[in-house]
């Protein structure tokens, strides 16, 4: 487990990276997250997080970006879950158990649709295979009014593609925002 200072810095890096989709520097963290620490101290904590595998640095003069391990830690320990209403919980339960699943991919599709509907945000759900490579990049391409193509590039160079059907019209700008 990380100490309080490291947790704060990791949270700030992940949230800034999610917002701007670019490496995050220590000065930006001090300005945007109100730390009472110097940029040098933040850099030191970021270096420790990099050594521990939570952050990476694309090149020497760049800021840091979260790794898969950093995103996972953020999701598991730093983000507080929102309480669902009884109705929302029942909707998810109905979606997951409304029929017998012939394939797990059907379950993932249903879960993704339910989460997207409840959050009114784009949602991807999938199964993780311990032998599969991590995702390196995801790109979304507008096909027509309510259809897009997701191209997922894995760290091992493998490319996967999925067609996405949306409930409402989607624009390339909104797809670009999801990529960032």
Image (cartoon, helix red, strand yellow):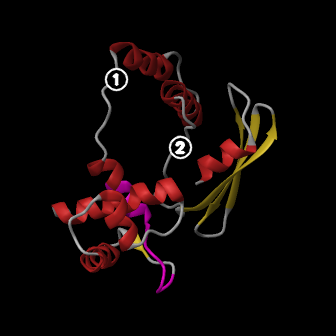
Q: Look at discs 1 and 2 and give the one toward the viewer.
A: 1
How would you rate the neighbour count of disc 2 (Cα within 10 Å): few for under 14, some for 14-19, many for 20 or more? Answer: few
* Residue named by callout 2: 126
* Label 1: element kind: loop
Q: Residue at x 35, y 68 (%)?
A: 54
In the picture, the disc for residue 113 is: none
The quadrant the N terminus occupies is: bottom left
| Above/below status of 73 relative to 165 | below
Question: In this picture, which residue range is highlighted in magenta?
Answer: 59-73
Q: Is residue 58 magenta?
A: no
Q: Residue at x 74, y 29 (%)?
A: 169
In the picture, the disc for residue 84 is: 1
Q: Residue furthest left?
A: 3
Horizontal arrangement in the rendering, residue 155 relative to residue 10 (left or right): right
Q: Residue furthest right?
A: 144
Hey, which quadrant is residue 135 in on the image?
bottom right
Q: Residue at x 50, y 61 (%)?
A: 131
Q: Out of 128 and 161, give the one closest to the viewer.
A: 161
Q: Residue at x 34, y 18 (%)?
A: 85
* Label 2: element kind: loop
* Alpha carbon separation for disc pair 1 and 2: 22 Å
Q: Earlier in the sequence, mark 1 or mark 2?
A: 1
Q: Residue furthest bottom?
A: 60
Q: Is residue 70 magenta?
A: yes
Horizontal arrangement in the rendering, residue 89 relative to residue 36 (left or right): right
| Above/below status of 111 relative to 124 | above
């Amino acid at each position: 487990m990380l100490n309080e200072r490291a947790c704060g810095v990791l949270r700030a890096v992940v949230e800034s990276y999610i917002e701007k989709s670019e490496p995050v520097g220590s000065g930006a963290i001090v300005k945007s997250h109100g730390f009472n620490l110097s940029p040098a101290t933040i850099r030191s904590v970021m270096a420790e997080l990099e050594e521990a595998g939570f952050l990476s640095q694309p090149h020497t003069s760049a800021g840091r970006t979260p790794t898969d391990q950093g995103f996972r830690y953020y999701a598991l320990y730093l983000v507080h879950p929102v309480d669902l209403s009884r109705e929302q919980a029942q909707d998810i339960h109905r979606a997951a158990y409304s029929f017998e699943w012939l394939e797990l991919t059907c379950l993932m599709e249903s879960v993704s649709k339910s989460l997207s509907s409840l959050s009114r945000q784009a949602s991807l759900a999938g199964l993780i295979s311990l032998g599969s490579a991590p995702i390196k990049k995801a790109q979304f391409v507008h096909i027509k009014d309510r259809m897009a193509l997701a191209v997922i590039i894995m760290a091992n160079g493998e490319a996967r593609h999925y067609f996405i059907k949306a409930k409402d019209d989607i624009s390339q700008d909104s797809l670009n925002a999801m990529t960032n």
